[in-house]
Image (tube, helix red, strand yellow):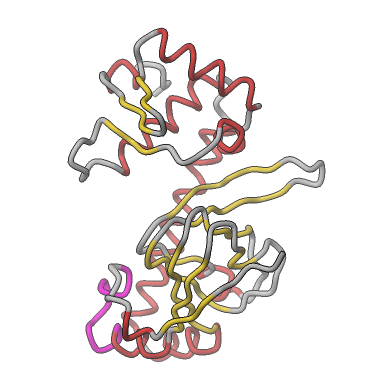
Amino acid sequence: MSTQITASSPKTVPLDKTFSDLPATLADVLEQEAVTTSYPTGAVLFSEGQAARGVFVVRRGRVRLTMYGRDGRTLILRIVGPGFALGIASVVSGRQYEATAMAQEPCEISFLRHTDFLRHTRLNGELAFWVTQHISQDYASTCREIRDLILTDSAQERFARLLVGWLDQNLDARNPTQVKMALTHEEIGQMIGTSRETVSRLFAGFKKLRLIQQNGCTIVVPNRTALESLIAV
């Protein structure tokens, strides 16, 4: 069954926080050249190994970045939200996309062709600096993910790190002790490098220890300090 994707005029979409990090004149130019598209859940923006066509900026919704092993295993690198730019390093380096980007939920995504993006980067120092910042932040995030996934032997600690990371992303919310979990146990396992069955046992164990409470897809962490005590410094 084919997936329907609809395009809309960039002028109808409010300025996102990523472009607003740039000088207003440059942000306006990028807005005019970007094509904004609505993607349904499960739609693929780009695939691992595909030639880099351009940069994708998340306007609304969330996008999942995934890598696939030769043995068939799946690793979810991260799930990103509004303001996140995807594919910058691949476009700048001229290499293939390193991961697959898929809509985790209905999304609006702005797309800038690689030729347009590189042209503006060469001509504008502010954009070049913005690119450097994003690549540096992506590198730092990747290093943290490698540390958490490979250098942490305990699935319990990896799960605790994941929950604390979700809390950190939720600090500005009305209730920072709560997070919405729109992932299955299997998908969480793909994020922390373990099986669905292990994730189910971790949930049960954390609830028994009163580290978390769960109401549907909402997870409540009543005592963040207790949760962080499971994480090695």
Name the residue at the right extreme. 71
Image height of 137 relative to 31, above or below: above
- Out of 232 and 161, give the one closest to the viewer: 161
Name the residue at the top extreme. 208
At a point 39% along the width and 24% down the height, the residue shown is 233
Name the spot of residue 63 as percent of width and height, x first.
49, 57
Looking at the rendered structure, the number of numbered marks drawn on it comes to 0
Name the residue at the front extreme. 1
The magenta segment:
18-27
Name the residue at the left extreme. 174
Name the spot of residue 99 as percent of width and height, x first.
63, 58
Name the spot of residue 6 as percent of width and height, x first.
51, 77
Left or right of residue 181, residue 54 in this image: right
At a point 31% along the width and 75% down the height, the residue shown is 19
Majority SS type along the magenta span: helix
Name the spot of residue 28 as percent of width and height, x first.
29, 87
Image height of 184 relative to 139, above or below: above
- Picture quadrant where residue 164 is located: top left
Image height of 71 relative to 229, above or below: below
Image height of 51 relative to 33, above or below: above
At a point 39% along the width and 78% down the height, the residue shown is 128
At a point 72% along the width and 64% down the height, the residue shown is 1
- Out of 120 and 181, give the one closest to the viewer: 181
- Out of 28 and 88, give the one closest to the viewer: 28
- Picture quadrant where residue 48 is located: bottom right
